[in-house]
């Protein structure tokens, strides 16, 4: 994944996903963290896209919180830095590939959502 090819919103979502993993004490940053970050951003297109697909976003957010609460946590958070999971790396690679195939120069939140739908095992459950 080329971080220089992310839109500002995509970059912000990844930063928020990392912060969410840190706050929760999760040793890995997963697609669930990214999807949660995309859903919590009121200015993101993701909630409006899901609403157009007849998704109840409030229920969806609650289910995301439940899934995130089930992730492993570490107890000692001093000098803690979560690692990107292989699953999230696949999501990001798929998103970048989708952007390229669509002729888009940058990877946007819509491409991230496509990556999650295609490779986000935990997020899809």
Image (cartoon, grey):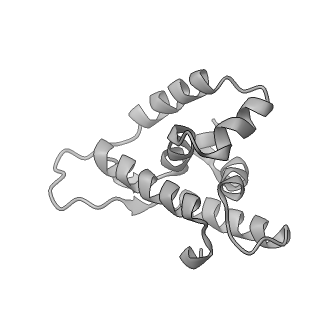
- Identify whether 39 is placed above or below 54: below
Q: Is residue 40 left or right of residue 102?
A: left
- Identify whether 95 is placed above or below 24: below
Q: Is residue 49 in view from this perspective?
A: yes
Given residues 18 and 120, the one toward you in this image is 18
Q: Count the numbered circles shown.
A: 0
Q: Position of residue 67 (x, y in %)?
A: 49, 33
In the picture, the quarter occupied by the C terminus is: top right
In the picture, the quarter occupied by the N terminus is: bottom right
- Quarter residue 90 falls in: bottom right
- Identify whether 108 is placed above or below 24: below
Q: Which residue is drawn at the image coordinates 14% and 56% (left, top)?
A: 78
Q: Position of residue 52 (x, y in %)?
A: 79, 32
Q: Which residue is drawn at the image coordinates 55% and 74% (left, top)?
A: 3
Q: Is residue 70 in view from this perspective?
A: no
Q: Which residue is drawn at the image coordinates 65% and 68% (left, top)?
A: 93
Q: Position of residue 58 (x, y in %)?
A: 58, 23
- Identify whether 60 is placed above or below 106: above
Q: Position of residue 34 (x, y in %)?
A: 52, 50
Given residues 51 and 98, the one toward you in this image is 51
Residue found at the far front of this picture: 43
Q: Which residue is drawn at the image coordinates 49% and 51% (left, top)?
A: 30
Q: Is residue 24 left or right of residue 118?
A: left
Given residues 80 and 3, the one toward you in this image is 3
């Amino acid at each position: 994944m080329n971080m220089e090819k992310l839109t500002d919103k995509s970059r912000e979502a990844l930063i928020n996903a990392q912060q969410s993993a840190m706050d929760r004490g999760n040793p890995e940053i997963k697609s669930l963290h990214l999807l949660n970050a995309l859903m919590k951003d009121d200015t993101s297109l993701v909630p409006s896209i899901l609403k157009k697909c007849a998704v109840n976003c409030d229920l969806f957010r609650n289910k995301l919180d439940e899934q995130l609460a089930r992730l492993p946590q570490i107890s000692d958070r001093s000098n803690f830095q979560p690692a990107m999971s292989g699953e999230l790396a696949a999501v990001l690679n798929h998103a970048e590939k989708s952007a390229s195939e669509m002729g888009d120069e940058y990877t946007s939140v819509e491409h991230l959502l496509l990556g999650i739908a295609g490779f986000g095992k935990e997020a899809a459950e």
